[in-house]
Every structure is written in structure tokens, then in C-alpha cells.
Amino acid sequence: MQYSSTREAFINSLTELAGRNRKIVLVCADSAKVIRADGFADRFPERFIDVGIAEQNAVACASGMASCGLVPFVATYAGFITMRACEQVRTFAAYPNLNVKMVGANGGIGAGEREGVTHQFFEDLGILRTIPGVTIVVPADASQVGKAVEVIADIPGPAYIRIGSGRDPVVFDEDLPFELGKIRILKAYGEDVAVFVNGHAIPRALAAAEGLKALGIKAMVVEVHTLKPLDSEAIADVLKLTGAAVTVEDHNIIGGLGSAVAEVIAERAPVPLSRIGIEDRFPESGDAEQLMDAYGLSVDDIMDACRRAVGRKERRSS
């Protein structure tokens, strides 16, 4: 498997944008090393602000800058934004609908393997989904992060981009575009079951679909990189086509992709659903791939979930 850095992709894209747009500002909370900010700070020292270990202040400062017409990006660990500064995100950025862009590193257990549970952030997406007006994206890899940064910079209002550890699997070709708010069908072997997935779990979902094909189960793999605004209509169309669904995410199964798809199922297309993710527990530290396997995100786990969903569909139709 090839690897690249979503952190470097973020800062490279932001630095390029800042060269074209003097309103771009980078705000850190003693996190310049985390997000590889040296290149931006060296080129635009007047637009680089480090508030120290004070994440709440970072979001508050960024909100003030946004109220003056700047486009601040706040970048640090995902949990430090979404937990330590949750009230500031909600009240200072989201409530007045300010143009604050947030970038959270170490999203998921696969991205926080070196630093343990205090720096494995598998609750971030669920927390932010409850805050009105926040755009939430989970790019698959470094090239998608770079493109997502460009897109997010151009839309009004608060937004959050989830990035990884700096050693992140390469999923797509570099020239693949990023379209905000739209699902993407990655593989369609058939219409027996839909596998909804995002982030660095995508290679596992694709491998599971390949394995299922050998067993006579034809899966459709669908990337959902934008959790808000969710492409609910297109997801419902896929659900109606397949009649069974599995969600795969490096996140607590409560509040993230699984919950989002479950809401669409409940309101638009009632079909059997199996959710694959962190099952409401705190994981240990370890190698990224081993952690994913240990906590229910293995290729076999995904295949088993697909078989269960198809079995439930068949029992309902019999």
C-alpha cells in the first residue's frame, strides 16, 4: 500500500491558496508541528497566528477574524477542536454563521495509532453533526484533502475537514476531482448490497466487495465524503436499488456515517442496515492496520456485515 501525508497536503494547498487570496489566515494552538505549518509561516508570517495551548482561544480568535472579513483556518488535533473548543465552535463560529474553517488531525483510530486513546479522535464527526450549519467533509487521502481545502475555502460559513496522522493510505489518483455534497460510486459489481464508506477505510470496503463477488454477492461501494450537507436523495436512491446496506467508518458507530445513513433509511428508504465502526468503546494504541482489524473494521468484518444485511433482505422478501 502506498502512503502520503494528509497533513502536508492540507498545508501545501492552504499555502497555495494564501498566495492568491490575502484573506486566508492560519490559526494554530501550539500545533504548527502537528500540521506541518512551517512553509506557510515562513511565507506568510503576518498571516500565521499561534495562540499557544489554548484551543478555545484559537476558535474565538478565528471567529473574530472571520467577523472582519478574513478567512481563518484553525488547525490542530481533531478532538481539541471538537471537544476542548466545542462551545466556541457552536457559539462563536456556527451560531453567527462565520467563515471559520477547521481542520482536525488524527481523525479515527487508524490516524492516531502512535499516540494512544488521548489522540485517537473517533467522536469528532458525531459531535459536529449536531451543530447547525457546519459543513463536514472526510476526504479519502492526501490528494482529496488538497482539493477539499480549495472547495471549503470558497463556500460561506463554518466548515470542518478531517485529516490523518501524516502517514495516510493513498486511495485515489491525484487527478480525481472533489465535489462537495455528492456521493461517489466507487465500484458497482451489482445491486445485492450497498457499502457506504469514507476516509481511509475505503480500501477495506473495496477489498470486501471483491471478496464478496467471489461468493456470489454483488456489492456497490459508495463513498460519502461529505457528512453535511448529506446527499440524502442520492443515498436513498442507492438504498432503494440495493435493498440492503452496510456502513464502514473509522468512527464511533454512534453519530457518524452509520447514524447518517440510518436516518436516511428511517425517513426515505427502509432497508436492513449493518454498521461497521468503533462499537462505542475506547481502543488501545498500536499499528494502524492492526487496530482497524482488532476493533471490527477488518475486510472479513465488512464481508460478514454484508452477508447479514443481504440475509435480512432475503428474509424480508420471502
Image (cartoon, helix red, strand yellow):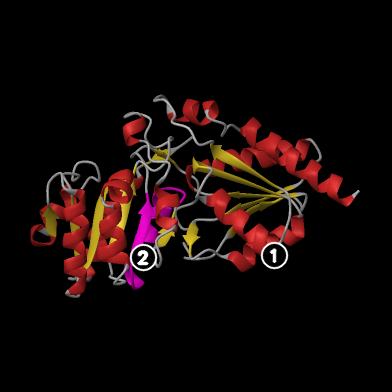
Q: Is residue 33 visible to us here? A: yes
Work out whether residue 302 or residue 284 is closer to the camera in this orientation and state it: 284
262 inside magenta stretch: no
Task: Where is residue 288? Give x, y as percent.
Answer: 44, 30
In the rendered structure, find residue 237 and report the number of the disc placed on it.
1
Indicate whether 225 appears above or below 251. below
User: Residue at left 52%, top 41%?
Assistant: 201
Q: Is residue 100 visible to us here? A: no
Whole-Å distance between the Cαs marked 2 and 1? 26 Å
231 vs 168, left or right, is right
The amino acid at mark 1 is Asp
Work out whether residue 123 or residue 141 is closer to the camera in this orientation and state it: 123
92 vs 4, left or right, is left
**Which residue, as the protein is rendered here, is positioned at the far right?**
318
Circle 2 residue: 152
User: Residue at left 28%, top 69%?
Assistant: 99
Indicate whether 287 appears above or below 40. above
Work out whether residue 79 or residue 161 is closer to the camera in this orientation and state it: 79
**Which residue, as the protein is rendered here, is positioned at the far left?**
46
Q: Which residues are magenta?
A: 139-162
The amino acid at mark 2 is Ile
Residue 87, image quadrant: bottom left
* Callout 1 secondary element: helix
Task: Where is residue 277? Give x, y as percent.
Answer: 54, 39
* Callout 2 secondary element: helix
User: Residue at left 53%, top 26%?
Assistant: 294
- Tell me whether the residue at label 2 lies in contact with that at label 1, contact meaning CB atoms closer than 8 angstroms: no
